[in-house]
Amino acid sequence: MRPIQAAYPHARFRRTRRTDALRRLTQEYTLTTGDLIWPLFVRDGENIEEPIHSMPGVVRRSVDRIVAAAEEAASLGIPAVCLFPYTDPSLKTELCEEAWNPCNLANRAIRAIKAAVPELAVMTDVALDPYNANGHDGLVRDGIILNDETVEALVRMALAQAEAGADILGPSDMMDGRIGAMRTALEAAGHKDVAILSYSAKYASAFYGPFRDAVGASGALKGDKKTYQMDPGNSDEALRLIERDLREGADMVMVKPGMPYLDICRRVKDAFGVPTYAYQVSGEYAMIRGAADRGWIKGEAAMMESLLCFKRAGCDGILTYFAPEAARLLNGMG
Ligand code: PBG
């Protein structure tokens, strides 16, 4: 497409920027509550909302408080929440058996939400790091992250989440072959309508730091995740990974982190035209929040701008810790 315009002064771009009405009429992309997925951290106990030091304003919730948050999400018009468990260190093992325990924290939270707010979509995280004694997303032997053995474990984990009632599975592990293995297993087990939102292009990023604090993985993690997560210098590889996951049966795809990777979002949307999501990750949240709390930027404006820019980059939705705050503003409840 090549827009045609007259020469100055017949063309004056400021005409359509003159008033709010004209600006709204000519805006190309918009953010709505329907674009938001709210990540929630789950912990054990009752009636607990525990602050996370590196993510001001974000808390870990006990299952009863998760249900309250889910009800809030639904009332704000947020279509989905995504659950991340903070697992008691005593339950973390080398074989990660807790990951497919039907009664683990994540699965209990899924059941509780689906019982209370069935219309809200529940998304999960499929990766072993919350359950792994060494903090990695995959099984480790002699310092090597095992691929095929991890995929088998992830399939068991995915089936337990589907059984608990999850609507969308979010494999965030970056092992090879996991989408096909999960899709085959889901079909065989009768979970034909469970969607997979693959973290297809997930980079080895320094912006995950606060999240690892939130799920208690920072202390456990030995080394880095560079043998399975992507190199931030790569772009074509993201397209190859997205195509691979689509061919294996992913329904939706994700780019992660978000803001430093908007070029990848745009390439993915243009190349495949599939439902495309970005994760505005913990470090991005912490940057905006931290600067806003110090009065260095206007928090609400920066938040809304950052979210709108994901839409402009081609995303259909955004996983963001700002979801309830943004939804309140979008609903005129600021
Ligand atoms: C791990 C996982 C991570 C995030 C989501 N799932 C961290 C990691 O890969 O180390 C990061 C989310 C965030 O930073 O907000 N499976």
Image (cartoon, rainbow, N blue to C red):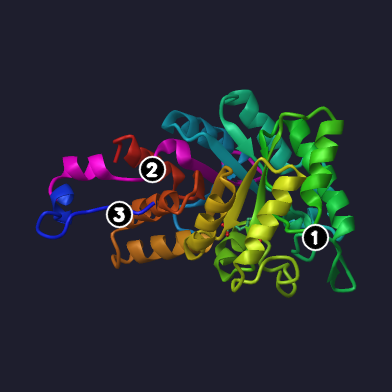
Residue for badge 2: 31
Q: Residue shown at 44%/31% (left/top)?
A: 77
Residue 248 or 232: which is nearer the viewer? Answer: 248
**Mark positioned earlier in the residue sequence (1 or 3):** 1
Proximity of marks 2 and 3: CB atoms separated by less than 8 Å: no
Cα gap from disc 2 to disc 1, whole angstroms: 35 Å
Q: Distance between the residues labelled 2 and 3?
A: 13 Å
What's drawn in magenta, residue-wise? 18-47
Is ligand 1 less than 8 Å from the beta carbon at label 3?
Answer: no
Upstream in the sequence, badge 2 or badge 3?
A: 2
Residues at marks 1 and 3, CA–CA distance in whole angstroms: 39 Å
Amino acid type of the residue tagged 1 in the rendering: Gly
Q: Quadrant of ligand 1?
A: bottom right
| Residue placed under numbered mark 1 in the picture | 138
Q: Does the residue labelled 1 lie within 8 Å of ligand 1?
A: no
Residue located beneath label 3 in the image: 301
Answer yes or no: is residue 301 visible: yes
Amino acid marked by disc 2? Leu
Q: Looking at the image, is 214 positioned above or below residue 334? A: below
Residue 116 at x, y percent in the picture: 59, 25
- Between tags 2 and 1, which lies in front? 2
The three-letter code of the residue at mark 3 reads: Ala
Question: Dot 3 lies on which element?
Answer: helix
Q: Identify the image quadrant of residue 143.
A: bottom right
Identify which residue is drawn at 29% across, 36% down: 332
From the viewer's perspective, is 290 left or right of 198? left
